[in-house]
Each structure stands twice: as C-alpha cells, then as structure tokens.
Amino acid sequence: MSMLERQDIDHLAALSRLDIAPEERDRLRVDLEAILGYVSELSRAVLPADLAADKRPADFPHRNALRPDREPLPGGENTAAILSQAPAMKDNYLVVKKILDN
C-alpha cells in the first residue's frame, strides 16, 4: 500500500510551485515514500533520558515553528509589480550588466 497518492504529489507541487511532468510523478512518489519511511524509522528511535522532550527545560530554545499548509499565491500575481521596479527590460527579460566572458 502506498503512503502517498497522486493527489498528494499534486498538492505538494502546488504548494512548492513546481511544475512536475506526469512522467516524473511516479518517480517522485517513490523517492518521497523512501524519505518518509526513513523519517518514520528515526521517529521510533529511543533517545537517552536526558534528551527526551519532556525532560527539556521550559526555556529550551528550539521549538517547532511550522505553519499550516495553504494555497500558494496564484502564479504571476506579483510579477507585474516586481518587474515594474526593474531598471531595464527587453523582450520581457531583465537587462543586466554582463559579468562573464564567453
């Protein structure tokens, strides 16, 4: 039984704003399942008593700071505002000073 479904991959792609080709989705699913399996193994590891989360002092500096998943901004929503601040444009590209020789 698969841990991840196609819609999970599609959801992750949308959140990360990646355009994943259909032929890459199955390979990505297999890779992500391997990663999740490894993380699952790590979560079952037994820690020494002095490292257990319930033994940490209340002012321990590291806390999870995760945000809930949400829909990303629609593509291109801020593009016009960003490009309007560019000093020079040509054919819808930013013009920059050449820094490398051929």
Image (cartoon, rainbow, N blue to C red):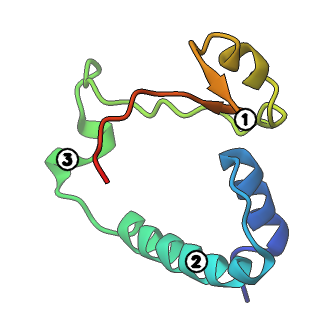
Query: Which structural element holds mark 2?
Result: helix
The image quarter containing residue 79 is: top right
Which is more N-terminal, label 3 or label 1?
3
Residue found at x 29% / y 43%: 100
- Label drawn at residue 74: none
Query: Which structural element holds mark 3?
Result: helix
Residue found at x 81% / y 37%: 75
User: Disc 2 residue type?
Assistant: Glu
**Nearer to me, 85 or 13:** 85
User: Disc 3 residue type?
Assistant: Leu
Q: Is 4 placed left or right of 32 in the picture?
A: right
Q: Is 94 placed left or right of 17 in the picture?
A: left
Which is more N-terminal, label 1 or label 2?
2
Label 2 Cα crowd, 10 Å radius (few <14 / some 14-19 / many 20+): some
The residue mark sitting in front, 1 or 3, is 1
Q: Where is the C terminus found, in terms of image quarters?
A: bottom left
Mark 2 and mark 3: Cα distance apart in space = 28 Å
Q: Position of residue 24 (x, y in %)?
A: 69, 79
Mark 2 and mark 1: Cα distance apart in space = 42 Å
Residue found at x 27% / y 66%: 46
80 versus 26 height, above or below: above
Mark 2 touches mark 1? (CB < 8 Å): no
**Nearer to me, 71 or 47:** 71
Q: Position of residue 74 (x, y in %)?
A: 84, 34
The residue mark sitting in front, 2 or 3, is 2
Identify the residue position indicated by label 2 in the image.
Answer: 33
- Label drawn at residue 51: 3
User: Disc 1 residue type?
Assistant: Asp
Q: Position of residue 88 (x, y in %)?
A: 59, 18
- Label drawn at residue 91: 1
**Nearer to me, 72 or 78:** 78
Which is more N-terminal, label 3 or label 2?
2
